[in-house]
Image: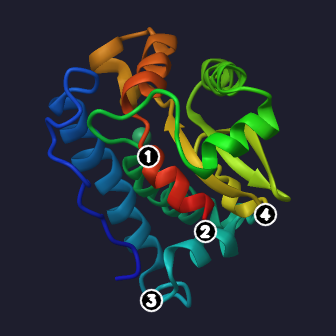
Amino acid sequence: MAITLPELPYAKNALEPFIGSQTLEIHHGKHHKAYVDNGNKLIEGTDLADLPLEDIVKKVAGDPSKAGIFNNAAQVWNHSFYWKCMKPNGGGAPTGAVADKIKADFGSYEKFVEEFKNAGATQFGSGWAWLVVDGGKLKVTKTPNAETPITQGLKPILVVDVWEHAYYLDYQNRRPDYLTTFVDKLINWDFVNSCLA
Ligand code: MN
């Protein structure tokens, strides 16, 4: 099958107390898995079945007759990327190339944080807030539902999931608190730097 469920890059309790093991159990084991299973059912026997996931997402994007495939495949890609954007004892100001690039393109780390958290907080309903490379410059952007910057010629280097299923058990309606914790305690800047390289 072309679409697979990656293992989490850490134990289910590794992000506690910021994201609980029950959230990861359901988010990865139920939500993410359902996108994988549904995506595979929809591409079975079609010319998409043997393509890499990223190619499937790009190929069906914008085609209303393939919306089901897009939604499931893009959600698989977005979630697989999201898990890698977090780590235990992460967050805080970055080091390395991304630190310099953030300062150059946003003015300061604080300004980046303000824009990133604002994007997540103002995404109405379900979606994602991203840090992307756009023509060589870093930019914060947000997408609704399953939409993903990889179909827009942008290179994602960081994402936060702002679907309620990502934070409701731990933060209930307090999405801004989840975003603050994500930035201060969870971001895996080593992974972000590897995406930038
Ligand atoms: Mn999610």
How does the figure colour the protein chain or chains? rainbow
Give me the residue at 17% from left, 31% from top: 22
Which label's residue is closer to the chain start, 2 or 4? 2
Secondary element at image label 4: loop
Single out the mark in the foreground, 3 or 1: 1
Secondary element at image label 1: loop
Q: CA distance from mark 4 to mark 3?
A: 29 Å
Secondary element at image label 3: loop
Verify CB contact (< 8 Å) between mark 2 and mark 1. no
Q: Residues within 10 Å of mark 1 (few under 14, many from 20)?
A: many
Q: Residues within 10 Å of mark 4 (few under 14, many from 20)?
A: few
Q: Residues within 10 Å of mark 3 (few under 14, many from 20)?
A: few
What mark, if any, has residue 153 been given in the picture? 4
The part of the image, by quadrant, that contains residue 119 is top right
Single out the mark in the foreground, 4 or 3: 4
Disc 4 residue type? Gly
Q: Quadrant of the C terminus?
A: bottom right
Verify CB contact (< 8 Å) between mark 4 and mark 1. no
Q: CA distance from mark 2 to mark 1?
A: 20 Å
Single out the mark in the foreground, 2 or 3: 2
Give me the residue at 75% from left, 58% from top: 154
Q: Is residue 46 left or right of residue 168?
A: right
Identify the residue position indicated by label 2 in the image: 57
Disc 2 residue type? Val
Give me the residue at 46% from left, 90% from top: 50
Identify the residue position indicated by label 3 in the image: 45
